[in-house]
Image: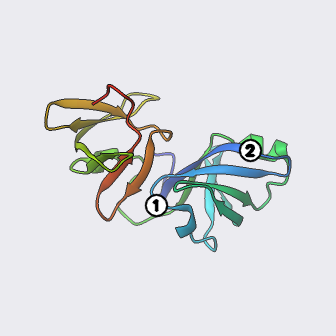
Amino acid sequence: MSETGGNLLQIGQVLKSNGTDGELVIGFFDIAPEEFDCKEPVFIYFDGLPVPFFIEALSPKGSSRALVRLTGVRSLEDADEIVGRKIFAEGEEGQEEDDFGALVGWTVKDADGRLSGTVTGFEDIPGNPCIDVDTGHGEAMLPLHEDLLLKVDKRSKTLIMKIPEGLI
């Protein structure tokens, strides 16, 4: 059974605490931090139940990360308790969390914008999900890790990735 239950979709993850007053660094997946609607709650699961939080302050740090202050998180101890947890938001009906299979057919480009290939499949390797990419010269398997995924453009169905030397 999905951790989300209803129509909550994972939008990011708490990467680390920042400072001593409860600020957090959050990595966002399918949305740029500045596009997030702070009037809507985000949810973090505790004991299997979604707990709503509101974003009081959000300062983008690059294209997929932001420095965030959540309601009720006021100390380093509060922040450290949620580091590593997934963040969810209300989503559209029919979408599912971690539906990486939907990436099949997407274009993969390197950090310089050069075409690297097309996604042909998804490998659900525990702790290391990967995508299969047809490079035009053969198949390559790329890890879907937040440090390598620079941008997800849903409109053009393009993944911009920092591709380590030798993988393609």
Residue found at the very far bottom of the displayed protein:
39
- What amino acid is at disc 2? Ser
In terms of depth relative to the viewer, which is nearer, 28 or 54?
28
Instruction: Find residue 161 and report its image quarter.
Output: top left
Label annotation for residue 38? none
Q: In the image, which is nearer the foreground, mark 1 or mark 2?
A: 2
Kindly indicate whether the residue at mark 2 contacts the one at mark 1 (C-beta within 8 angstroms).
no
Instruction: Find residue 77 and report its image quarter.
Output: top right
Viewed as shown, does residue 141 lie left or right of 143? Answer: left
Viewed as shown, does residue 120 lie left or right of 128? Answer: left
**Rendered-image quadrant of the N terminus:** top left
> Circle 2 sits in a helix, a strand or a loop, which is it?
strand
Instruction: Point out residue 69 in the picture as x, y percentages from the top left corner.
Output: 74, 59
> Circle 1 sits in a helix, a strand or a loop, which is it?
loop
Viewed as shown, does residue 155 lie left or right of 35? Answer: left
Q: In percent of the image, x 31 and y 28: which residue is there?
A: 167
- What amino acid is at disc 1? Asn
Q: Is residue 42 above or below residue 19?
A: below
Give the labeled residue for mark 2: 17
Q: In percent of the image, x 21 and y 50: which residue is there?
A: 105
Q: Is residue 142 above or below residue 5?
A: above
Q: In percent of the image, x 38 and y 65: which residue is there?
A: 93
- What's the distance in space between the residues labelled 1 and 2, CA to CA? 28 Å
Q: Report crowding for label 2: few under 14, some 14 to 19, many 20 or more residues within 10 A (C-alpha).
A: many
Label annotation for residue 7? 1
Residue found at the very far top of the displayed protein:
166
Instruction: Point out residue 49 in the picture as x, y percentages from the top left corner.
Output: 62, 50
Instruction: Point out residue 73 in the picture as x, y percentages from the top left corner.
Output: 79, 54
Instruction: Point out residue 81 in the picture as x, y percentages from the top left corner.
Output: 75, 41
Q: Report crowding for label 1: few under 14, some 14 to 19, many 20 or more residues within 10 A (C-alpha).
A: some
Viewed as shown, does residue 77 lie left or right of 163? Answer: right
- Residue 6 appears in view: no
